[in-house]
Image (cartoon, coloured by chain):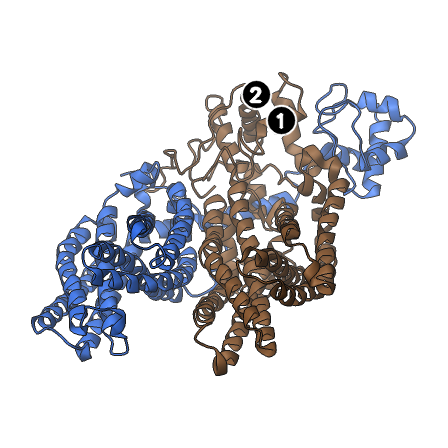
Chain colours: A blue, B brown
Amino acid sequence: MNPLPLPHDIPLQMPLPEGLAKILLVLLFLVHILFVNFMLGGQALAVILEILGLWRKKYDRLAYEISTTVTVSKSLAVVLGVAPLLAINVTYTIYFYSSTILVGFAWMMIILMATAAFLLTYLHKYTWESWGESRRALHVTVGAAALVLFLSIALVFITNINLMVLPAYWPRVAGFLSAVLLPSALLRYLHFLLATLAIASLFAAGWFGRSGFDLGRLPGFTRGEIIALFFRIALIITLLQFLAGPALILSLPVQGHSLTVWLLILAGAAIAVVFAFLLWRALDRLPQQLGTRYLLILTLLLGTALLMAFGRHFYRERAVAPHRQAMRAKTETMLWDSRAAQSRARMGLTRVVYTSAGEKGFKTNCAACHGESTTIVGPPLMEVRSIYAGDPDALVAWAKAPGVKRGGAPMPSFRHLPDKTLHEIAEYILGSK
Amino acid sequence: MDFPLFHLDFIGNRMLIAITAIVHVLINHPMAVGALPLATLLEWIAYRRKWADLDQLAYKITFVVFIITTSLGAMTGVGIWFTTSLVNPDAIGSLIRVFFWAWFSEWVIFFLEVIFIMIYFLSWKSWSGDKKRRHLLTGLVLSICSWLTMAIITGILGFMMNAGKWVPYTHEWAPESSLFTAFFNPIYLPQLLFRSAVAFLSAGIFFLFLIPLFKKVTFELRGRAVRPISLWVLAWLPPAVIGALWYWQRIPPFMQANAPIALTTQAFVKWYHSILWILLGMALIVPLTTLIGAIKPKKLPAALLIIPFLAVTTLIGTYERLREFVRKPWVIQGYLYANGLRAQDYPLFQEEGVLARATWVHHHQVTEENKLEAGGEVFMVACSRCHTLSGVNSVRTRLQTLFPADKWQEDQIAAYISTMHNVRIFMPPFPGSDAELKALSAWLTANQHLALRAEGGQTALLPSAPVLK
């Protein structure tokens, strides 16, 4: 077996019961990822529809309407991401930080990429009209650039989270790309992208299909057409997911598998089958209204998402469990040994004995730079004695406000030492022959 | 010693945090915490006086604030977490253990802030007429939320510098309420007063700079906007001064002693007083500008208003840099050193060495054969959070200043390192064993002419101890 890096945990008490922290993590992450789906899936739909709109104007309007939701979704995605980030910091401290550091460059790039992507989505939205037809290609490029940035950010996050639960793989990682190629990272990414598109499409079906939406903003569409368009995308993607999902679960390293994980994920998949069937039935009879069927679809989707989220959580827990147990034992040992060493130090077993207070002060404060007869950093004591013989006050005054006599590194001021200590040191220097 | 070490040997790890954090503060203080109440105030004046042009101007300012804060502002805020968890995971990990609920509350308020800023900005045009009062109320709630997020973070920043009566509880000891002790540390209230006043007044300076940049701002409109903004800035000046003095007086004396070097670096420390005068001069630009603005608002020369803005930006940046440096050698005062090692573990490290139980090193014991390599690992564990090998704040440059060229000697360097913390009081004591001290000194000496490698965990293949089979 590979050598497994086994660090110590942070030896401070958990601020909340672990179970509560983990429930917070799973649920708050789900809310965060929902808005990430709206943001990234929305941007993907907006870019694709804007390109279609080059030939058929009505898609351009639809793309614009989607882009106005993206800038709101992205702000919510960020703010809702802070809570799960906090929760994962406290629940998986060692795992999360270790994997984060191993993909450190890419992780830092998230900040730059997200800032750029956000500014680009604003530019994309606010220049839709004003740039006009002549700059259409540039406008599409702006939207596409934001999309590429969003896609890259997602890849970094997924790679890190995948690496986090696999400490056995940590020593093999040298740079971000080697972490992307670890088992399951790319399949996780594919699974995520499909889910994002399906959820963004369902959101769009509800957003534009709701009775309160002013259809005048989308000339050329009937309500039914819009609903059918997005239902169709969601259905096709969901069918693809039935291929990607099993591939993913089979690719997950063996450490985390358990009956609970499989039961949760299969239950989630079973609900997804019903949900896909409902979408297909809805398309069969060209819906004119969203109706209660839409609510049912959303409820089923929520069920799938919750089951999958907890399935993933139990996989994670199982994957790190033995490592975490060993880490706790190691932390405990360190705490005991550290405390024992503290009391040995207090009892003076390791203390250096000085003959006078002046000697102690000199050795701890001055000896680093001043030798007896050789120049280390500053002048040797022999020289100091020749200047200050019989005048300890002048030496103290100099130590409090030193100047530069010989060039080189200036002596720092010792004003922070008590006067008494400074005098003891001065007398030690001048008195010791 | 428990995490792979992220390391940037050119700009240095501290710089990465510093850039992110300072950009965040320079956006957060003038453009969010300060800007939102001031924009609401201008909107209210416009409403009371029925000045449609001032209302329009407040809207334009809010647009700029909205775009910047919801992109660069928000992301650099997240970026502080990202950078600190890369550079000093022990520090941020420990802080989160103590302040989880503070950060959680901050998140709830931050969430409200984002919701309210979207409502406030996006409903500006539609909530007019009878609905204007509702819009103003939204602005007020938004301003309070924005200030509260800062008020919470201030507690954590103050704790790092002066942990007060806080006692670290390990998981086996009795859980006691350490959050409140930590949060209401001795520096909390003075820093909050200072930060709030600075945030509020810097927003006024930012607005004064911004207004002439908009198109279609008439001479009359400038007068209408400049006077209340100037009065606002003048009103916050006394609290800022009182806050600053009170704050300084609460900083532990040994940290106050760091101020000259924090401000000027070791090389230029003799310019400390000159630089203080320059900073004071920059600060005086603020009352000077706003006094003119309050008395003769139309006389304020638009083209020169970038000067107070740059002055305030420089002052805030300098303050943050100073605060970060002065707290050294601690990252949590009395508990965790800037090198990420706990003070409580020092006796153990001094006995058995800092490499003995480290996770991500090749050598756990120093031997004659591995002396140089182990010395390099000691450097990474004990020094690399603040020092590079050959970039910014590099150990080679430091040693070149201290010791005559071509004459580095292992013993001299070892003697220096063993007591340097008493001399350079911003340095943590050397954590390791005697053998490690010698190994480190040997490695440093070997770097006199040719820099060896100092590579971080984000690029290098790292070893790990084969402990769990």
- In the picture of the structure, the residue carrying the numbered disc 1 is B399
Tell me the SS state at disc 2.
loop
* Kind of residue indicated by mark 1: Leu
Question: How busy is the neighbourhood of tag 2: few (under 14 within 10 Å), some, or many (20 plus)?
Answer: some
Q: Mark number for residue B180?
A: none
Instruction: Residue at the far bottom: name it.
Output: B130
Marked residue chain, label 1 = B
> What residue lies at 81% left-to-right and 36% top-to-bottom?
A401
Question: How busy is the neighbourhood of tag 1: few (under 14 within 10 Å), some, or many (20 plus)?
Answer: some
Marked residue chain, label 2 = B
- In the picture of the structure, the residue carrying the numbered disc 2 is B448
- Percent from the top left, x then y, of residue A108? 42, 45
The answer to whether marks 2 and 1 mark residues whose Cβ atoms lie closer than 8 Å is yes
Q: Mark 2 or 1 closer to N-term?
A: 1
- Percent from the top left, x then y, of residue B459? 39, 35
Say which of B431 and B297 sits in front: B297
Say which of B357 and B55 sits in front: B55
Tell me the SS state at disc 1.
helix
In which quadrant of the rendered image does the C terminus of chain A lie?
A: top right
